[in-house]
Structure formats: structure tokens, C-alpha cells
Amino acid sequence: MSTETLSKRTLFFVNAAHALDHFVLLIYPTAVIAIAAQTGLSYAELIGLATGAFVAFGLCSLPMGWLSDRFGRRNMLAVFFLGYGLSCLGVASANGPTAFAAWLLVLGVASAIYHPVGSTMLVNHARQLGRDLGINAVWGNLGAASAAGVTALLAATLGWRTAFVLPGLVCLVLGAAFLALVPGDGAPHASRSGKAELIPVGRPMALLTVFAIAIIAGGMTFNITTISLPKVLDERLGLDLPLALTGSLATLVFVFGAGAQWLMGRLVDRYTLPALFVGLALLQPLGLALAATAQGITLLLGLVLTMTAIYGQVVVNDAMVARYVPAQHRAKAFSVRYFLGFTVSGFVVPMLAVLYARGGFGLVLGGAAVFGLIVWLASLAFYFLAQGSASEKAAPAE
């Protein structure tokens, strides 16, 4: 098999895996509305059962880069497909809180494989880095976007268990196809443009610290918004809509995020990353503050602004890892990046349940706006530190 063919096949499956990773993880936050109606348990009780899944999503990402270096990225991505499929079928078989919590935990462990492994495979096989990062991010966003709509439709027509069974079967089929069509990791793409050239920095620890703060706070806003979105629309839009239409509106909000990711993929190859980071991060606190204080169409506008910022930033942050971290450390760097973002934000689920019980979604979104402000302040610090580093590098030696 030629290097070109292997890269094309690898990129297809990496993109498909990204879509499934976000789709499957967001089935439960929508299905929980139907599960609550069937079981009589409250939303706060049921959403809390997903804590293990979202914590494992981040916590277990840390060793995945090491495991991929040891056992091969292709093999680990195969485990992702097959493990995700089996865990979906397990959740569909659950009949009580303990079974839900256990199978959701397994699902979270499987979901943790994708980002550190898939992101490294993407950077290695990309033909044009910014463009391919943007395309991959759109696949992931469309997975997240369609989760609410598809899950709501399946739950309303065929039952909530079907909403887990069908994606589980898709994961298993894609896993078998991946094993058959992609024989190994392959070498990095030799003829790509927009390669991940290393950007030298003068104060790496300071840059790393503010970047880590932005990742952690951004993970909080990401998970608060994506997990609560279907229920926020259900309660605060001011329209008495059936579950299927509520899910479709959530999908529409996510689609705007996909558009931002496509755009960021193009801009990453043309403009400096710190400048893009600052401009995009500002939209997070603005959108979240608007959503926290509004209802109806204004609420929808705030959520669209928020999703545009959150998902666009994913592309920028991945590009920053690709261009500020040496190639030999990139898999581990992606592991740490997603460990920080997803592990801390995994505690969003119990926090969301507490805040919702005390002050509804006004308090939930207000808390998210505070984290969004932290992201923007960290992006400003990164910008000035990066500018200072560039000046130091450009200054002649005395």
C-alpha cells in the first residue's frame, strides 16, 4: 500500500472516530430526558450517574499516549472502535442506577482513547495541517451536533435503548473495517504543506502554565454547555416543544460550532496562533453571560455565540500543541492536553446537578461565564508572553 493511500484511509477513520467519540458521549445527556419519564427518577439524579464517564474521559486520556507508543496507534484506535461499540450495548442493557453508572464508566474509559491517539495520527498524516485539523474538528462537532437530534428522534420513536444500540453497532462495523483496511501506523506524510513546524519560545514554562489554565477552564465551559444544552433549550426557550424538536434545535446550535471550526482550520495556516486565541476566547464569556440572563431567541443567540467560540478554540489549541511541541513528544503532549481539559471538566456533572438544583440554568450558565472569562484572561497572558518570546529571539546577541 502506498503512503498516500494509507494516509487517506487513516484520515478517514480518524475523522469518523472523532465524530463517534463526541456523538456517543452525548447520547446520555439527551436520552436522560426519556429515561427520567420512564423511570420516575429526577434529572439531577440521573445526570449525576454520568460522572464516572466524564471523569474517565479525561483521567484515562493521560496513559493513552504512552500506550499508543508501546502498542501502536493503529491498534489503540481499533480498541477505541470495538470498546465503544460494546459499551454502548452495555448501557442499552442497563435497568437501574448502578448498571447505568457502571456501563457509563466503561464507555468513558473507551472514549478516552480517541483524542491523544487520533490527534497524533492526524498530525502525522495531514497533507495540510490547518485545513485537516479544521476538517477533523468539523467531524467531531457534527458528531456532537447530531447526538441531541438523533438521540431525541430515536428515543421518541423507538425508545431510548435503541439510541444506544444503533451507534454501538456502527462502532463495531467501523472497527472491523478499520482493522481490514489500515494495516499499520505508517510514516508521517512526506509531501504535506503547512507542516507542524516547531515554533521556538523563550519562556516555555510560563507559556505552558497559562495554556494549561486556558485548557482547564475551557474544558469546564465545553462540558457545562454541551451536557446541559438539550435541557437548557427544553426549559428556557419559552416554547412547549416535543423532545424531537428540542433535540433538533440543539443540533442547529452545534452546527454553528462546526462552521467556526472549518473557518479556524483555514485561519490557522494564515495568522498567528496567539492572536487567533485571544479573539476567539473573548466570545466565550460574552455568549455565556448573554445566555445566562436571557430566554427565547436571545438565549439561542447567546448559545450560538458560545458554541462558535468553544469549538473554534479546539482547532486553535490542537494547532498550538502541534506547533509548539517537538514531534517526539507530541503524543504525550496531546495526552496531557486532554487529561487537563477533560478530567477537571468531568467534575462538571455533579457541579451541574448541584447548581441546577439551587438556581436553575441561570446559575449554571453564569458559572460557565466565569470560566469563560478565565479562558480569555489566560489567552491574553499567552499572547503577551509569546510576543515577548518572539522579541527575545529576534534581538541580536550582545
Image: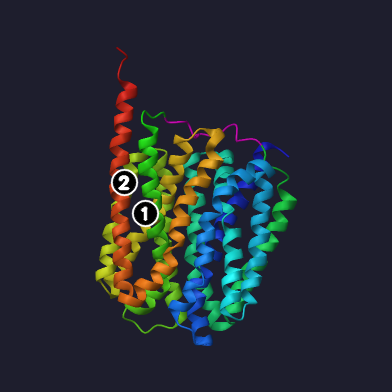
Across and down, in percent, residue 334 comes to: 51, 44
Mark 2 lies on a secondary structure that is: helix
Q: Dividing the image into 4 quarters, which one contains the N terminus?
A: top right
Q: Amino acid at mark 2?
A: Ala
| Residue 102, horizontal then vertical, whole percent | 60, 70
Label 2 Cα neighbours within 10 Å, binned few <14 / some 14-19 / many ≥20: many
Q: Which residue is mark 1?
A: 217
Q: Who's the residue at 32% across and 45% down the image?
A: 379
Q: Is residue 5 above or below residue 370?
A: above
Amino acid type of disc 1? Ala
Position of 372 with respect to 25 (left or right) is left
In the image, what residue occupies the spot 27% across and 74% down?
295
Q: Quadrant of residue 93?
A: bottom right
- Out of 251 and 61, give the one closest to the viewer: 61
Q: Which numbered circle lies on residue 378?
A: 2
Query: Which quadrant does the C terminus fall into?
Result: top left
Q: CA distance from mark 1 to mark 2?
A: 9 Å
Q: Is residue 203 left or right of residue 76?
A: left
Residue 229 image offset from top left, x and y in percent: 40, 70
* Residue appearing at x 56%, y 43% in the figure: 120
How far across and how far down the image is residue 29, in percent? 48, 72
Q: Is residue 178 visible?
A: yes
Instruction: Find out whether the residues at labels 1 and 2 contact each other: C-beta distance under 8 Å.
Output: yes
Q: Tell me if residue 344 is in the magenta stretch.
A: no
Which residue occupies the extreme top position in the image? 398
Q: Which stretch appears magenta?
A: 187-199
Q: Is residue 57 above or below residue 197?
A: below
Front residue of 221/168: it is 221
On residue 329, the disc is none
